[in-house]
Image (cartoon, rainbow, N blue to C red):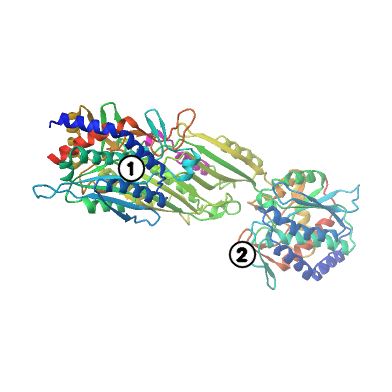
Amino acid sequence: MSDRVTYEGFQAYLERHLPSYLDLLRQMVTINSYTANRKGVNALGKMTADLFVELGFTAETIPSAHPQYGEHVVLTRTGRRKDGRAAPKIGLVSHLDTVFPPDEEIANDFKWRRKGNKIYGPGTSDIKGGTVIIYMMMAALQTMMPDVFDAVTWVVLLDAAEEAEAEDFGQLCIQRLAGNALACLVFEGGKMKRDTFWAVVVRKGMVVYEVEVEGKASHAGSAHERGANAIVQMADVIRHIDEFTNYERDLTFNVGTVTGGTVSNRVPHYAAASVEMRAFLPTVYEDGIARMMALNKLSSVGTANGDYGCQVTVEIRRQTQPWPQNEATEKLFSVWQAAAKALGFKVLREERGGLSDGNYFWHQVPTIDGLGIAGGNAHCSERSPDGSKDQEYCLASAFVPKTMLNIAAVLKLVRE
Amino acid sequence: MNNTLSPNTITRIQTYLTQQRQEMLALLEKLVLVESPSLRPESQAGIQSILQAALKTLDYEVERIPGQTSGGQLYAAPQHLPADRPQQLLIGHCDTVWPVGTLKEMPLIMEENIVRGPGVYDMKAGLVQMIYALKAIQMLQLKTAVTPLIFINSDEEIGSIESTPHIRRLAKMVNRAFILEPALGPTGKLKTARKGVGQYEIVVHGRAAHAGLDPEKGVSAILEMAHIIQTLFALNEPETGVSVNVGIIEGGLQPNVIAPQSRAVVDVRVPTHEDAARIEQAILTLPSVLPDVTLTINGRINRPPLERTPANQALWQTAQSLGQRFGLTLDEGLAGGGSDGNTTSLYTATLDGLGAVGDGAHARHEFIYIDKWLERCTLLALLLLSPPAEQ
């Protein structure tokens, strides 16, 4: 069977079943699975597990490290090769949770809604559409190429708390995939324009810092000079942090929140800020951390007579290393390029600012990302009449081509 | 002049008040045990009823002026108000900064010469002084040449927003005003000057964006606020006494979103009217630094400075010489905080800080000295008996 015939068969199969796949998506979107909605996340996990069990997968649930979050789901179908050698293993990663609390969905009337080619709803593009693409790949391969399907060990890993940047799931992926997996495919949304696709091969690293300033309180009216204003010290810290941002080096800092003081007639003794840093290159990332930590020595505001200087404390609250350009990912990307070419498509590299689970395991398992559905406005539930804001959606017409590209690439991967 | 104030009269007043010590302490205890935070308007009815009853025994007619956002005010005038005589205004406030329940952790404590408790110094002791100075005059059948009127508000600690129009109206009518706020510092200086006080709120509107995906699309309201805070800080003038305190700041949503909004609250203290105008202008016209941000600035100098005007200085000199007549050495001082005296001074001779001597206004260790309190009560009675100031 030539590749062309094979692809035509897959295409016809997928198109015939598309209405039922879109109905699966509808069912998934109807279940609220906000990260902190443990029950909803678990219900979606159960529903998704049942789907894959029908394809012969074994389902496991693993509790999140954080007790408030739901259970991660691991679905495994162990492959058998006729020659008796170990079956190659491929990981497929998506997540169960979304960023939308139930109240927000109700308040913004954000629910499943199809308008032409656009399917609106919480998690449509981030990432329930991606989970549907994994299912489409598995169902089509099982039906159309059962020999190939049976000869691969497929491990579908569904994170219960990706949006909360839970690190325990990354460890779970490494545990299940490291050492013997050909690849780990991540199904976060990915752009598509006509016959051009984008795959994510690099992601920024991120550090969240907590900055605290300890000043000295005093009455603003009767003893202003005896106070050391923590807010004024924080303003100087913020100005310093702003100067660390360097767009040419792709190093950015954002003071996301700030708070300080109690009442206006008191010189404030305390101020706090949360700061986020992003960088693509590991060296730049480390340099950014060093600059931030050096602020621990800053004390530029104090009492009038200089007997007390404000104290600045910078601490790393959480951090995720960058997923930099690397050989293993680039090799996978070339497989996707070849597959795209065979289908008459084109695939381009994308370096993305946001994080995904890929940041946690790219160094242990060859990883490629952005293989999920095309859409827009991820994380947005609002609509404005002037169109400047619209709700998250995915494109119905993208399901088949995106799945086709992934199938073609996986076939090349297992044959190599 | 001062013909009613013979040495004998002064001694009689001192003796009378010394005899009233227990009664005064009992009234003070009652006032402190009724908690009356400004922010709980409904808490004012209790203390107002006690004060109303006390004023009635002085043959004063008491009017309760209801409040909209505050607990309302008390205005009292003699039942038989002499029409042809000048008048003098006594001002006190019955609200405190202490929330209901404070007494549990900070109970009323009577020691040999000290009373501790929430609001005892600022300024329930001053209210007792007011009543007993008038009582001494009544019981000793002394005659005032200037008729005392009484105004007690319940929103002083939150800027006297509702009571200020009444204070202004009364201040315009009277020959002089005495403010029963606590004296200044442990030596009990009278307050002949107070800084003006203003409060401003600055809101910065920036533009939100995802800090990871497209940081260049956002404009940080927090960064803009950092520039503004530094500009405001530069307005401080330790040498002239102008202070600009950014007391509160808040802004932003979460670390990965460029902050669309931030807010700061600023407290301003100014010694002169000129400073007030200059600093107010500087704050209301603060320039923005980053492109595409907008600033919303609200606020004003709501208590003008209490300056050492000739009329205020004359009243202070009267107090000083009256003190000397019974061995009380008085000093004058500048207070950083504002009071209703800042308002009366715009219209009439004003002397402030005539209340109790102690320490710890708005602080846990708030207390008064009983002996000095009785002295200050004598001083007040003598001031009330003094002839009108020359207009």
**Residue A73 on image: x %, y %:** 30, 51
- Magenta span: helix, strand or loop, mainly? helix
User: Quick one: SS at disc 2?
Assistant: loop
Closer-to-camera residue (B28/B112) = B28
Closer-to-camera residue (B12/B166) = B166
User: Quick one: SS at disc 1?
Assistant: strand
Taking the magenta stretch, the answer to whether it contains residue B215 is yes
- Which amino acid type is marked by label 1? Arg
Q: Chain letter of disc 1? A: A
Quadrant where the N terminus of chain B is found in the figure: bottom right
Question: Does the image show residue A54?
Answer: yes
Question: Does the image show residue A320?
Answer: no
Closer-to-camera residue (A139/A388) = A139
- Which amino acid type is marked by label 2? His
Quadrant where the C terminus of chain B is found in the figure: top right
Classify B290 as above or below A286.
above
What residue is disc 2 on?
B365
Q: Chain letter of disc 2? A: B
- Identify the disc placed on residue A385: none
Taking the magenta stretch, the answer to whether it contains residue A368 is no
**Residue B246 on image: x %, y %:** 54, 46
Label 1: few (<14), some (14–19) or many (≥20) C-alpha neighbours in 10 Å: many
Q: Quadrant of residue B361 in the image?
A: bottom right
Q: Quadrant of residue B279 in the image?
A: top right
Highlighted range, magenta? B214-233
What residue is disc 1 on?
A278
Label 2: few (<14), some (14–19) or many (≥20) C-alpha neighbours in 10 Å: some
Q: Is residue A260 left or right of residue B384?
A: left
Whether residues under marks 1 and 2 lie with C-beta atoms below 8 angstroms apart, the answer is no
